[in-house]
């Protein structure tokens, strides 16, 4: 288990309790590291979270641009949660999200916005 994955797990727990989602950059910053190029560090941490803590709602961490591969488990989970998506373009769908469903921590740096 990595320290990053453990820190991300804590942030995911906060998101679950608040019933919100957050972008990779915001989750990573809250967990004390950078999301990395194209969110790669976050993707690696999320793989470990899914393996070590399968009960956590990993799908609450979304890419900074809100684009998600169409037909994936994350799209299914977010749809069940009540999220909506734009049309599929090149195998990707854009998350449409009301700002009140996006987690904002008062002590966090500026949050990345998601397409609305």
Image (cartoon, rainbow, N blue to C red):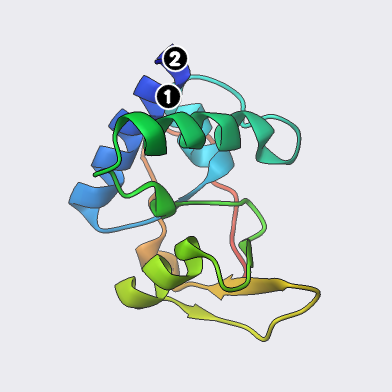
Say above or below: 21 vs 5.
below
Quarter of the image holding residue 85? bottom right
Q: Is residue 110 visible?
A: no
- Which residue is located at x 42 percent, y 76 percent? 83
Instruction: Quote the CA–CA distance across marks 2 and 1.
Output: 5 Å
> Which quarter shows the N terminus?
top left
The location of residue 37, given as percent across then percent down, is 76, 33
Q: Position of residue 25 (x, y in %)?
A: 58, 39
Residue 94 appears at what percent x and percent y?
63, 72
Q: Residue furthest left?
A: 17
Is 30 situated left or right of 34 in this image? left
Q: Is residue 79 left or right of residue 55?
A: right
Q: Is residue 57 above or below residue 13?
A: below
Q: Residue at x 55, y 42 (%)?
A: 24
Decide which of 52, 89 is in the foreground and name it: 52
Residue name at image x 44 percent, y 73 percent: 98
The extreme right residue here reads 90
User: Pointer 1: what residue?
Assistant: 5
Kindly indicate whether the residue at mark 1 contacts the one at mark 2 (C-beta within 8 angstroms): yes
Which quarter of the figure has residue 30? top left
**Residue at 42% from the left image edge and 54% from the top image edge:** 59
- The quadrant of the rendering that contains the C terminus is bottom right
Q: The residue tagged with tag 1: helix, strand or loop?
A: helix
Residue denoted by label 2: 2
Location of residue 109 in the rendering, given as x and y in whole percent from the top left corner: 52, 34
Q: Residue furthest front?
A: 51
């Amino acid at each position: 288990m990595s320290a990053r994955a453990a820190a991300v797990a804590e942030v995911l727990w906060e998101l679950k309790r608040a019933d919100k989602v957050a972008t990779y950059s915001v989750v990573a910053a809250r967990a004390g590291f950078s999301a990395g190029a194209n969110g790669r560090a976050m993707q690696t941490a999320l793989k470990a979270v899914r393996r070590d803590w399968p009960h956590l709602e990993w799908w609450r961490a979304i890419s900074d641009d809100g684009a998600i591969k169409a037909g994936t488990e994350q799209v299914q989970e977010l749809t069940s949660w009540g999220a909506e998506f734009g049309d599929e373009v090149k195998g990707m769908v854009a998350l449409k999200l009301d700002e009140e469903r996006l987690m904002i921590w008062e002590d966090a740096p500026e949050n990345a916005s998601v397409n609305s």
